[in-house]
Amino acid sequence: MAITENLVFMIGALVVIILLFFYLGWLLNSKVGKRSISTAEEKAKQILNDADKEANNLKREKLLEVKDEWYKKKSEFDKEVVNKRNKFSTLEKQFSSREENIEKKFDLVLKKEKEAKDFEKQLQNQKVEIEKRIETIKKLENEQNEKLEKIAGLSKDEAKSMLVENLIKDAKIDAFQTIKELHEQAKNEAKRDAQKIIVQAIQRTAADHSIETTVSVVQIQSDDMKGRIIGKEGRNIRAFEAATGVDVIVDDTPEAVILSSFDQFRREVARVSLERLIADGRIHPTRIEEVVEKVKAELEEELVRDGENTVLQLGLHNMHPELTKHIGRMRYRSSYGQNLLQHSVEVAYLTGIMAAEIGLDVNLAKRAGLLHDIGKTVDKSIEGPHALIGYDLTKKYKENPIVSNAVGSHHEDIEMEHPIAPLVQAADAISGARPGARREPLEGYVKRLETLEELAKSFDGVAKTYAIQAGREVRVVVEQDKVDDTLADKLAHDIADKIQEEMEYPGQIKVTVIREVRKVSYAK
């Protein structure tokens, strides 16, 4: 029994202890839960507060950005308005100044017109006075002739016959002396005249010429590339045109872009640059400037190599490096469609062949032929005929004086001093006048010759006109009873001036006036 009671007591005590522990655990659990809930609520409130603060900060930042953007737009607009106002004020000033200039010019014209009328009156008065003096002089001459006849005891006809006889004797003496001098001069110039005859007869070579145009066509893979070439609001095409100095034509031509410029070197730089940009795919203003500068430097080096190769091709030596550069630049120069480098090489060969035929220095002749148009490669800011510019250029780089003279005289701007000079002139004429060398249709060529003949025939006293040497010379036959020797010189000058004013032609045109006098007598 005692054991059973102890067991029951222990079980009850154990149950009480378990209930006590359960109660303590429940009590602790409830406090911890309340604390975690309160902590969570505080964290939630903190998060909400932080979110509100961040939202307010973002709102302030966006408002500031909007305000900055608005201020920028406003300042740009204000600047644009100020610029336009400045432009308008500048234009207004220009118009006012032009109006003042026009008024001044009008007043000046009125003043000059008045002066011209006064001058015309003076001339009229002087004319009347001169006529009176002429009448007085005629009267004095008649009186003097009558007095001389009385003093000499000879009539007017007798004195005239004596004077004519004396003049005839003096004229015969002078004529014989002149004939003797001409005979000696003919002997001295016989060799040179023979050389000129040979020059005119030689036409032994010809070369192929490609006609240069003013446009280049760049092929593209698809028409979508045209939009990339133009760029946003046209910035790419404007940057490309500014960098190259070439007009870019993007039209409806399928898969092609046209480059237009009269400067062949610029057009070549633009063509190579555009092909590289299309192949690379990166087309924007900065990249365009980089590629154009790089291509320009490469082509400049290529021009130097072309000049060196041309000099080696002709077998010439000791050419100054600057002259070699100018020779290379001939590759991108043309005259009436004829490539200048090919033309100069052909002239060099022609001059060398003719020099060999007549026993002159072949190397000097080739140098003169190659450099004869070197003045066309000089910067356009230097004014003057290309022959004289080339003459100064060759002298500057210490070329042989014979070569310099041939360069400067091949268009007769200076006097020829050596037989090589007319050789260069003849070779230049042969190369330029040969059919197909220069771009000119047959109809235009024939019309130009007809216009030249008609223009020369429009002057009084002209009987016949002949255009020869592919339009480089016009020969005018005049009526000998209407045009004397003095008038013939004036007629040649007037015809040349009229041709220069009214016609367009390559090189120069020589005007030769021929006056033939024939005296016939019969022996019976």
Image: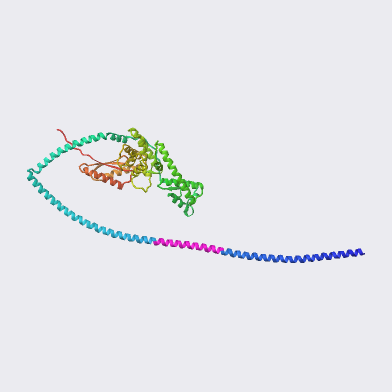
Asked if 240 appears above or below 338 in the picture, the reply is: below
33 or 450, nearer to the observer: 33
Image location of residue 413, percent across then percent down: 31, 43
Dominant SS in magenta? helix
Image location of residue 276, percent across then percent down: 49, 46
Q: How many numbered callouts? A: 0
Q: Does 490 appear in magenta?
A: no
- For the point 13% across and 40% down, the residue is 164
Image location of residue 25, percent across then percent down: 78, 65
Image location of residue 119, percent across then percent down: 22, 56
Residue 24, quarter of the rendered image: bottom right
Q: Quadrant of the N terminus?
A: bottom right
Q: Quadrant of the C terminus?
A: top left
Which colour scheme appears in the figure? rainbow
Residue that extends furthest to the right in the rendered view of this protein: 1
Q: Does 73 appear in magenta?
A: yes
Q: Is residue 163 left or right of residue 435?
A: left
Would residue 350 be seen by someone viewing this image from the given angle? no
Residue 469, quarter of the rendered image: top left
The boundaries of the magenta stretch are 61-89
273 or 32, nearer to the observer: 32
Q: Is residue 399 left or right of residue 76?
A: left
- For the point 14% across and 37% down, the residue is 169
Residue 189, quarter of the rendered image: top left
- For the point 22% across and 36% down, the residue is 181
